[in-house]
Amino acid sequence: MVKKTTKPLSKQGISSGFSINSFLSKEDKEEKQEETIVKDENLPQSHFTETDLQMEWNLFLKQLQSKDPFVFNAIKTFSLVKAEEHTVRVLYPSESAKAEFDKISGEFFNHFKRKVHNYMIKVDYHRDFENLKIEVMTKRKIFEKLAEKNPLLKELDNLMKFDLS
């Protein structure tokens, strides 16, 4: 004898706290609440120098060289210049290098702002067409630059016939 039921045996009206739909609806509510306005009027605005900026940038590059060589090679030609009291100008050679810099720029500028106690720093990006290529310095080129400063080196080269290849 087979018994037939008119209602399903499981309870459909009750959902567990671990259902996917409840998780997604909670996530949507949380994202809407994240929008907050940060007032930066009372934040510290200490003075920083060009030297402070260069020292921190060079230190950051050294750390990045061992941590992530790919990003280091992409951004090592960037130059950071203090343009105004609260403005740092970033000169970048290409858009692809800027994309790599954007990944780590937050880390650098957050550290720099904490270091110099200036949270009003604004970043201004400019494309730098002059430093697009990196010149490879060979021993001959280094010697020629030194010979420009000291002509006696050129005479010594003529006399001794140095092999700088």
Image: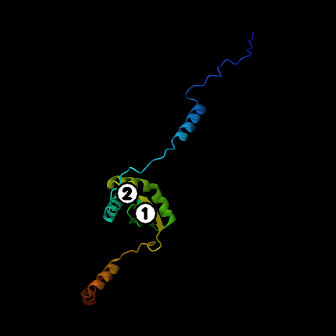
In the image, taking residue 34 as reference, residue 4 lies left or right, namely right
Q: Amino acid at mark 1?
A: Ile
What label sits on residue 64 in the rendered view?
Answer: 2
Q: Is residue 50 above or below residue 28?
A: below
In the image, taking residue 164 as reference, residue 125 lies left or right, namely right
Residue 124 placement (x, y as % from top left) = 45, 63
Contact, mark 2 vs mark 1 (Cβ under 8 Å): yes
Q: Is residue 27 visible?
A: yes
Q: Is residue 105 above or below residue 84?
A: above
Q: Is residue 165 visible?
A: no
Q: Is residue 55 above or below residue 30?
A: below
Q: Quadrant of residue 92?
A: bottom left
Choose the circle earlier in sequence order: 2 or 1: 2
Q: Which residue is mark 1?
A: 75
Which residue is rendered at x = 51% and y = 64% of the image?
A: 95
Q: Quadrant of the N terminus?
A: top right
